Amino acid sequence: MIYEMPTKIVVGENCIKINSNLLKNMGSKALIVTGANSAKKNGSYDDVALALKHENIPYVLFDEVEENPSLETIEKARDIAITESVDFVIGIGGGSPMDAAKGIAVLIKNPQLVGDTLICDKVLDGVPVVAVPTTAGTGSEVTPFAIFTDHKKQTKLNYGHRVFPKIAFLDAKYMSDMPLTLTRHTALDAFSHLAESYLNTKSNTLSEIYVRAGVELFGKCIGSLRDGNISIKDRENLLLASTYAGIAIAQTATTLPHAMGYALTYFGGVSHGMANALLYREFFGAFEDKTRINELVGWLELDSESQLMDIVDELLGECVATFSDDILKEQSAIVFANKAKLAGHPEKITEEKIFEIYRKSVR
Ligand code: NAP
Ligand code: FE
C-alpha cells in the first residue's frame, strides 16, 4: 500500500489571514487564478490579496477561468505568468480554477509545452500551487488531478501529471451564499468521490478511514441539503467531507461514473456533480456484491440503497439535457477503452453494460 498526502491542510474561519506567513515559502510572485465573479463576491480573493500584501508578496490576477476549463485558457494564463515572472500559483474557486492553477503550474515549469501538449506521456512537475476551495465538492485542493476540456478531442481529460497543492486553506465562510442547486450538485460530487473510492479495487485501509469519516459528515447534512436550510456548521461539514473525499480519491482515483460523466458535461452542458450523480442509480444497481454499498448506506444512517438513490435523485433535480443513442454508444466505447479507469471497477463490466447504464440514466 502507498499512501500519499503531501498537502498542508489549514482549516478554520479566517485561516488565510491567520496563517499568511505560510505563503512566504511558496515563492516571490504569485499568479492568482479565479473564475470571473464568485471569488470577488465571496471574500476569498480579498483575503488572499490581503495576505499576500501582508507578506510583501506581489501578485497578478487571472480571472478568466471558465467552468470545465479548456487547454486554451491554461495556455493564455501561462503566457501572462511568464511575462510577469510569476513563480507560484494560487487557485481560488471551485474545481475549475483550482485545476486550472495546477495546469498553469505545470506549463510554467515546462515552458516547452503549449496547452495542446500539456496532456502528454510524461509525468511532469509544476511550480508550487496553493488552493482555496469555494465549493465543497471536488476536493481538488488535496488531489494531484486536474481535469481539462480538450475541444479537439471533444472531451474532458485528466492531465496525467501529479501536482498536489502545497497548501489548502479551508474556510467555509466563502460558501455562505452559495445557491442551493450548486451546493447540492457539488455535495453530490463529493459523495460520488467517496463512493467511487470505496467501490474501487485500489481502496485501502487508509483511504477507507477518510471515506467513512466523509460519508458520515455528508450523512449529517442530508436533511439540510434536502430542506435547503444550510447552516455554517453544515457548510463546514460539507467542506470537510469534500476534502476527505479528495484525500481518498488521491489514493484510489475515481471509477466509472466519473469516466462516463465527462461526456454528459461535454455534450449536454450538465454540471460535473450532476453528471456523475445522474448515473448513480444504475451504477449502484449494476453491482452484484452489495456488501460495500450496504456499508455506505449504513454510515449514512439510511435504510436501503433505494432510499439513498431517491435522495440522490431529489438533490439532483431535473436534467433537461438529452443525448442521442449514437453519442452514448460512441462514448460507451471510449469509456470501455479506458483501461486505467476500468481497472478501478471491482466487478466485470462490458461495453454493452456501460451503454445500458447511460441509456437508463439519461434520455
Ligand atoms: P466550478 O466549475 O469551479 O464552478 C461552478 C460555478 O460555481 C461557477 O460559475 C463559479 O463562479 C461558481 N462558484 C464557485 N464558488 C462559488 C461560491 N462560493 N458561491 C457562489 N458561486 C460559486 O465548479 P466545481 O463543481 O467546484 O468544479 C468542477 C470542475 O472540477 C470540473 O471541471 C471537474 O471536472 C473538476 N473536478 C476536479 C477534481 C480534481 O480532483 N481535480 C475532482 C472532481 C471534479 P465563478 O466562475 O465566477 O468562480
Ligand atoms: Fe468529481
Image (cartoon, rainbow, N blue to C red):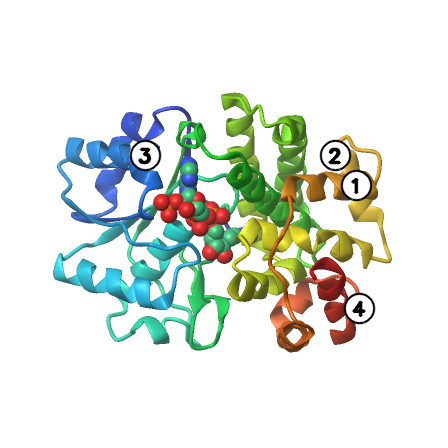
Residues at marks 3 and 2, CA–CA distance in whole angstroms: 36 Å
- Any part of residue 93 in sight: no
Which residue is painted at 50% across and 39% down in the image?
136
Dot 1 beta carbon under 8 Å from ligand 2: no
- Any part of residue 82 in sight: yes
Front position in the image: 20 or 331: 331
Of mark 3 and mark 2, the one earlier in the sequence is 3
Q: Which residue is mark 1?
A: 295
* The N terminus: image quadrant: bottom right
Q: Which residue is mark 3?
A: 41
Residues at marks 2 and 1, CA–CA distance in whole angstroms: 6 Å
Left or right of 279 in this view: 238: left
Of mark 1 and mark 3, the one earlier in the sequence is 3
Of mark 1 and mark 4, the one earlier in the sequence is 1
Q: Are marks 2 and 1 in contact (CB under 8 Å)?
A: yes
Residues at marks 1 and 4, CA–CA distance in whole angstroms: 21 Å
Q: Nearer the viewer, mark 1 or mark 3?
A: 3
